[in-house]
C-alpha cells in the first residue's frame, strides 16, 4: 500500500527534531546538513533512535540543503542530499518511509521580496531531483511562512519528481503566515496545486497550536500532519531550551490526535518525546476526512470564498493607470478585482500586470479572457454571476 493510501486507514508517526539532536555535535558556524558527509554515522544513529522510539516516517537531514546555504560549505547540494537519504535509508530499512526535508531558502520572493519566482523554483529543484534519485519516498516542504515560497517549492517538486508532496507551514499567534496569509489562504494554494498532505509544524507548543490545527481540519480536504515544538523556547546560559517533558508532550498531543493522520515533533522534541506520544496517541480514533465543497480564490495572502454575497469590482482593462483603477475598485468595496483581457494586447504581459496590481493591493484577481467567456451582469457592491467560469 502506498504511503498516502495508508493514511486513510491508519496513523503514521514522524520522528522529532534533527536540529535538537545535532546541536551538541556542531562546531560554531557549521551547517547541520554538512554532517551527512562528515559524520554520517551520527546522522544514522539519530534516525535509528527515532525508529526505535516507534517512528515510521523519517525526515532527512536536508532542511537547509540548497545552493544558497551550501555555497561556502565545500559540498554540492546533490552530495549532501544523497548522503542524507542514504543515512536515513540505512537506518530505516523496511521499517520506515523516508521524507526529504525541504526548508525555506532564507530569501523573500516577489511580490514581498526581490527574488523572482522562477529563480526560487530552480533552487528548490536541486534537492528535489537529488532526493528523488537517491530514493526518498516523499517530499516534505516544511516550516513555510510565505505562500509564494510554498508555490515555488511545490512547482519544483511536481516538475522534477513523481513523489507524494507534503507541505507544512508555520503560523504566528494570530494564525497568520509570515507574509500575512491565514490558514484558508495556505489551504487554497496547497490543495489547488495538488499536494497530497498538509499540516502545521514548528512555531509553538502543542497547546498553543491546537486551535490552529482544529481550524486547519475545518478547511482542508487533505490528510493532516502535526509536528509542533516541545513548548516555547527559553534562553538559558546562551542555549535554547525546551522545557516540555515527554509525558507533557504526549498528554497534549492526545488532544490533537483526532485531527491528524501523521503526528511527530519539531524543535525540542527527542526520541523520548516521540515514544511517549506514540504510546499515548496510537489508539486514538481519527476523525474522518470530509470533503468540503466550496470555491476559493486567493492572492498571496488573502483568500475569499466565492458565493452569492461576494463583491466583485467593475471589470478593469489594463492601461497605464491600472494601479489607480485597482485602488478605486478596492475603495468601492471590491473583494475581488476583475481584470478584463478580452480584446486587448496585454495577455502576454499578465505576470507584469499582476505584479503591478500586487504592489498596491492584496485583493485576489479574476481574469476574464475570450476563452472563458465570463459574463458579468452586475458590478460593485452587488451580486454577480460568472457564466462559464
Image (tube, rainbow, N blue to C red):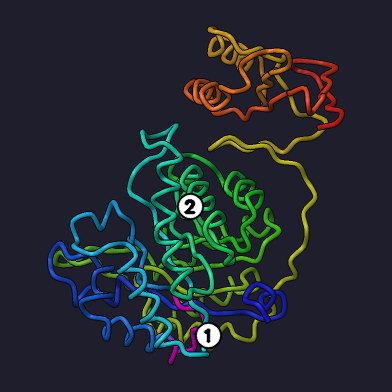
Q: Which residues are magenta?
A: 51-58
In the rendering, at what x and y percent does residue 339 appear? 67, 20
Q: Residue at x 27, y 86 (%)?
A: 41
In the rendering, at what x and y percent does residue 176 appear? 50, 45
Q: Residue at x 41, y 67 (%)?
A: 229
Q: Residue at x 41, y 66 (%)?
A: 130
In the rendering, at what x and y percent does residue 231 appear? 39, 67
The residue indicated by pointer 1 is: 278
Q: Which quarter of the picture shows residue 299?
A: top right
Q: Residue at x 61, y 13 (%)?
A: 318
In the rendering, at what x and y percent does residue 140 appear? 49, 64
Whether residue 53 is situated above or below residue 207 in the rendered picture: below
Left or right position of 370 against 269: right
The residue indicated by pointer 2 is: 153
Left or right position of 213 against 1: left
Whether residue 185 is situated above or below residue 263 in the rendered picture: above
Left or right position of 326 against 352: right
Q: Residues within 10 Å of mark 2 (few under 14, many from 20)?
A: many
Which element is circle 2 on?
A: helix
Tell me the quarter of the image containing the N terminus.
bottom right
Q: Residues within 10 Å of mark 1 (few under 14, many from 20)?
A: many
Q: Which quarter of the picture shows residue 108?
A: top left
Amino acid at each position: 500500500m502506498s504511503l498516502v493510501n495508508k493514511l486513510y486507514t491508519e496513523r503514521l508517526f514522524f520522528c522529532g527534531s534533527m536540529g535538537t539532536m545535532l546541536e551538541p555535535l556542531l562546531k560554531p558556524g557549521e551547517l547541520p546538513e554538512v554532517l551527512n558527509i562528515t559524520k554520517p554515522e551520527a546522522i544514522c544513529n539519530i534516525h535509528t533512535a527515532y525508529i526505535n522510539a516507534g517512528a515510521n516516517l523519517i525526515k532527512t537531514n536536508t532542511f537547509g540543503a540548497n545552493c544558497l546555504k551550501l555555497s561556502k560549505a565545500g559540498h554540492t547540494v546533490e552530495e549532501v542530499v544523497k548522503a542524507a537519504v542514504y543515512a536515513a535509508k540505512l537506518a530505516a530499512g523496511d521499517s520506515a518511509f523516508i521524507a526529504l526535508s525541504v526548508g525555506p531558502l532564507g530569501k523573500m520572493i516577489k511580490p514581498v521580496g526581490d527574488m523572482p519566482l522562477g529563480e526560487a523554483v530552480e533552487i528548490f529543484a536541486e534537492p528535489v531531483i537529488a532526493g528523488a534519485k537517491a530514493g526518498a519516498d516523499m517530499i516534505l516542504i516544511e516550516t513555510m511562512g510565505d505562500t509564494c515560497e510554498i508555490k515555488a517549492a511545490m512547482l519544483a517538486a511536481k516538475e522534477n519528481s513523481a513523489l507524494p508532496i507534503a507541505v507544512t507551514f508555520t503560523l504566528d499567534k494570530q494564525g497568520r503566515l509570515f507574509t500575512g496569509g491565514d490558514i484558508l489562504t495556505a489551504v487554497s494554494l496547497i490543495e489547488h496545486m495538488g499536494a497530497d498532505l498538509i499540516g502545521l509544524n514548528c512555531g509553538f507548543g502543542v497547546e498553543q497550536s491546537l486551535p490552529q490545527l482544529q481550524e486547519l481540519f475545518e478547511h482542508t480536504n487533505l490528510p493532516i500532519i502535526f509536528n509542533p515544538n516541545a513548548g516555547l523556547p527559553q534562553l538559558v546560559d546562551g542555549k535554547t531550551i525546551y522545557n516540555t517533558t515527554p509525558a507533557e508532550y504526549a498528554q497534549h498531543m492526545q488532544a490533537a490526535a483526532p485531527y491528524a493522520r501523521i503526528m511527530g515533533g519539531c524543535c525540542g522534541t527527542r526520541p523520548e518525546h516521540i515514544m511517549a506520544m506514540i504510546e499515548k496517541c496510537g489508539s486514538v480514533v481519527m476523525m474522518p476526512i470530509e470533503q468540503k465543497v466550496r470555491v476559493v480564490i486567493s492572492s498571496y495572502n488573502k483568500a475569499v470564498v466565492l458565493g452569492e454575497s461576494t463583491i466583485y469590482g467593475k471589470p478593469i482593462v489594463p492601461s497605464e493607470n491600472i494601479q489607480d483603477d485597482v485602488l478605486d475598485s478596492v475603495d468601492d468595496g471590491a473583494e475581488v478585482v476583475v481584470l478584463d483581457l478580452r480584446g486587448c494586447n496585454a495577455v502576454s504581459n499578465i505576470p507584469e500586470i499582476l505584479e503591478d496590481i500586487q504592489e498596491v493591493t492584496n485583493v485576489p484577481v479574476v481574469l476574464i479572457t475570450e476563452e472563458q467567456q465570463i459574463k458579468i451582469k452586475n458590478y460593485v457592491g452587488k451580486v454577480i454571476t460568472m457564466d462559464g467560469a
